[in-house]
């Protein structure tokens, strides 16, 4: 009975991991939806501050394929997307999600203007900011600390992998120490941290991907987003794939790796994402990612088959 209680302690729908749905409904007591916005930022590894060209897998939209229309103001983007969402989920609350590129990479006055343009919109109860560990200056960190007292603030930090050889290959242009330092600085200010990782990066083994999760587990992050590598058109990654034909994870391999990663994660860490949402028009590989809900169901079925759950192997991380 104790194992059953542990298995389903952070879910409302019999998932065997700590679901975002459980986290949101427990914290806010209502339906909360993220609205992806495009604030028109760039990245320090695009404009030459630390590198050029960006991460090799990144599309021209900077991971903002499903964000708002960059030609429109942020309030207009928000209202347009909200109107569509409210038809499906009326009476919802919203988190403004600054998604595309690096959303703390600008002078403080510009960041303030952009964040605060949506902060007080009707039904906005929080802000999520996707960024890099090397792109939060001290004055910005001080402002985020203040912002955290006014709204529900989450900082999403891209890591992707702990392995320096892979990090160099994908042109991340920051090191693991920088990531760890920024996580700790945010945590000292009681700001929630969600880490992004990517499974299936070129030439990484299952063991390497599990090592990335074990490392994050010991950093005591609040949440994690697990992505499968998308090879999309017109990216350096697509060129590399055409040249080297590095192995792509099969759906079965991905499911196996994700479940193994979940087994090592502290059950208190919220699983914000467990797969990717590629744009089918631009996706080269893997095509099995297009059927997102089939993949999610297959993960659930395999976890049930193995009689496993998030955190079952957490003692092995200590």
Image (tube, rainbow, N blue to C red):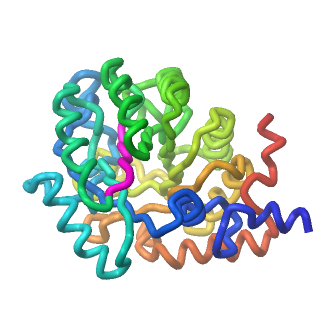
The image quarter in which residue 93 lies: bottom left
Number of numbered discs overlaid on the protein picture: 0
Q: In the rendered view, would you say 316 is above or below 206?
A: above
Q: Which residue is at the far top?
A: 138
| Residue 59 location (% of width, % of height) | 26, 51
User: What residue is drawn where x is 81% and y is 60%?
Assistant: 6
Q: State yes or no: residue 168 in magenta.
A: no
For residue 125: magenta?
Answer: yes
Extent of the magenta region: 124-131
Q: Which of the 4 image quarters holds residue 87? A: bottom left
In this rendering, would 282 be left or right of 95? left
Please identify the residue farthest to the right as the structure is shown.
Answer: 1
Q: Residue at x 62, y 68 (%)?
A: 252
The residue depicted at 49 percent of the width and 35 percent of the height is 191
| 277 shown above or below 162 | below
In the visual, does 96 lie left or right of 226?
Answer: left
């Amino acid at each position: 009975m104790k194992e059953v209680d542990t298995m389903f302690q952070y879910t409302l729908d019999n998932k065997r991991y700590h679901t975002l749905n459980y986290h949101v409904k427990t914290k806010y007591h209502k339906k909360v939806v993220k609205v992806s916005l495009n604030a028109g930022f760039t990245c320090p590894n695009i404009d030459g501050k630390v590198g050029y060209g960006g991460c090799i897998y990144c599309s021209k939209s900077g991971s903002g394929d499903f964000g708002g229309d960059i030609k429109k103001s942020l309030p207009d983007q928000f209202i347009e997307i909200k109107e569509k969402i409210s038809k499906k989920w009326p009476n919802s609350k919203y988190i403004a999600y600054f998604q595309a590129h690096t959303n703390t990479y600008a002078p403080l006055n510009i960041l303030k203007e952009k964040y605060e343009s949506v902060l007080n919109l009707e039904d906005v109860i929080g802000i999520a900011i996707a960024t890099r560990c090397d792109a939060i200056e001290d004055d910005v960190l001080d402002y985020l600390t203040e912002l955290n007292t006014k709204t529900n603030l989450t900082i999403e930090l891209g890591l992707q992998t702990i392995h320096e050889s892979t990090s160099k290959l994908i042109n991340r242009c920051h090191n693991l120490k920088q990531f760890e330092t920024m996580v700790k600085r945010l945590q000292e200010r009681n700001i929630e941290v969600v880490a992004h990782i990517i499974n299936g990066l070129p030439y990484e083994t299952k063991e390497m991907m599990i090592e990335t999760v074990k490392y994050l587990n010991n950093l005591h992050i609040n949440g994690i987003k697990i992505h499968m590598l998308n090879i999309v058109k017109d990216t350096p990654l697509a060129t590399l794939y055409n040249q080297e034909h590095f192995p792509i994870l099969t759906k079965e391999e991905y499911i196996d790796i994700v479940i193994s990663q979940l087994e090592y994660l502290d059950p208190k860490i919220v699983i914000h994402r467990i797969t990717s949402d590629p744009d089918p028009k631009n996706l080269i590989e893997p095509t099995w990612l297009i059927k997102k809900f089939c993949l999610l169901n297959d993960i659930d079925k395999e976890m049930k088959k193995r009689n496993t759950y998030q955190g079952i192997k957490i003692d092995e991380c200590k």
